[in-house]
Structure formats: C-alpha cells, structure tokens
Image (cartoon, rainbow, N blue to C red):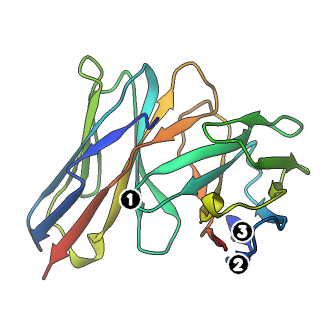
Amino acid sequence: SQQGEEDPQALSIQEGENATMNCSYKTSINNLQWYRQNSGRGLVHLILIRSNEREKHSGRLRVTLDTSKKSSSLLITASRAADTASYFCAAGIYSSASKIIFGSGTRLSIRP
Amino acid sequence: NAGVTQTPKFQVLKTGQSMTLQCAQDMNHNSMYWYRQDPGMGLRLIYYSASEGTTDKGEVPNGYNVSRLNKREFSLRLESAAPSQTSVYFCASRGTGGQLFGYTFGSGTRLTVV
C-alpha cells in the first residue's frame, strides 16, 4: 500500500498565487522528500526534510513536517506556468536504510 | 553528466515474451532502484539494490527479476510478460550518506504488453 497520500489529488490556481499540497504517511520515517514530475518525464528531487526538522526552505519552496501528525506540506509561492507538474511526497522509511515509498501525487495546473 | 540512463524508452511486447530493461548511472551511487508507475498512482518499488552484490524485493516484485551487474548497472527482467505489467518503469539511484539525499531518476521506459 502507498505510504504517502497527497491532498488534494488535483489543484488548479492562477499564476502568481501560492500552491499548497499536503502529504500524510503511516509509519516512522527518517525523512520526507518531495519530487516533481513533468508530463512524460522522470521525477526530479526538490527538497528533503529530516525527521528532526520542522521546516525547510529552498527558493520558492517551503516544506513543513509534523511527525506527531505524520504529515507534511509543500508550499510553492508566487507560482509560475513552469510549475505545472505532478508533485509527489516520498517517505524515507525508518526501518530500512534504502527505501522510500511514494504517495499518489498532486497534479498542479497553473493558469496564465 | 548523463545521470541515470534507461533503455529502451519505449517497448511493446506480446504476452509471454521476455525482455530486459537496462539502467546505468555514472554518479558512483551505491543504491539503485526499479519503480513502476501506473496511471493516477505514485511509484511502487519493484526491487532495489542497496549496494553492489545485493538485491532485495520491494512492494511489487512478482513477475520480475533483477541483476546488479556492477556498481553502475542494474537491470530489470520480465521473464513472461503479462498485460498487468503494462506500465512506465523508472530506474533511480542514490548516493551514500544514509537517507540524507534524494534520488536521481531516469527518464523512464514506457512498456505496453498486448
């Protein structure tokens, strides 16, 4: 079963607005990662937050992690047309040194 | 810097045929992975190799075999393809440092089994 579940499944916003995507996971994690996938392409790593961190920033990206609620959020500020893609969270599983488990993704569409 | 290279990019197989998907990385990464992605779903782990010489099953290993040929190459074999294996297959790799780094993905192999 999927470890991470994203919410919403699809999101359409106006260019310039902020986009927020949420992720919930089931078990203890080492870290939580976010990836972007453009249509027909492979996944690109965006940001990783460790289990002992609560917030992390990278450019227009802001990620939060709440381990007590087993949830994370990805905020993209000042969205651009190029941000149109699917976004996946992936849980780095504590009991495994090598595995991450992906959620089903959020499809983000930016309207011009 | 090529990163992770997958071949072929597209393939159509008849039910019962076999094929091997190839993956190579040039980043000196220890760990390599095979995922499949079905419409509307995230990626599901098929097999992974934490280091050269080791392989382990993931979430959906049935119908697949893998070989970690050397540090660079990790292949995925379908011995007798079934329509349920129609999917997009992604290979990924990760460097050392525990789980502090993200994965690097290839561009995928789109496989159709008819």
Distance from the alpha carbon under mark 2 to that under mark 3: 19 Å
Lateral position of residue A30 relative to residue B18, left or right: left
Q: Give the quadrant of residue B59.
A: top right
Residue type at numbered disc 3? Thr
**What x and y, as percent, mark residue B31?**
72, 42
Residue B29: tell me if it is visible: yes
Q: Which residue is mark 3?
A: B5
Residue A64: tell me if it is visible: no
Q: Which residue is mark 2?
A: B12
Q: Which residue is mark 1?
A: B40
**Numbered disc 1: secondary structure:** loop
The residue lying toward the viewer, choosing from A7 and B80, is B80
The residue lying toward the viewer, choosing from B39 and A68, is B39
For disc 1, the chain is: B
Which dot, 3 or 1, sits closer to the camera? Answer: 1
**What x and y, as percent, mark residue B106?**
63, 64
Label 2 in the same subunit as label 3 = yes
The residue lying toward the viewer, choosing from B62 and A58, is B62
**Numbered disc 2: secondary structure:** strand
**Numbered disc 3: secondary structure:** strand
Label pair 3/1, CB-CB below 8 angstroms: no
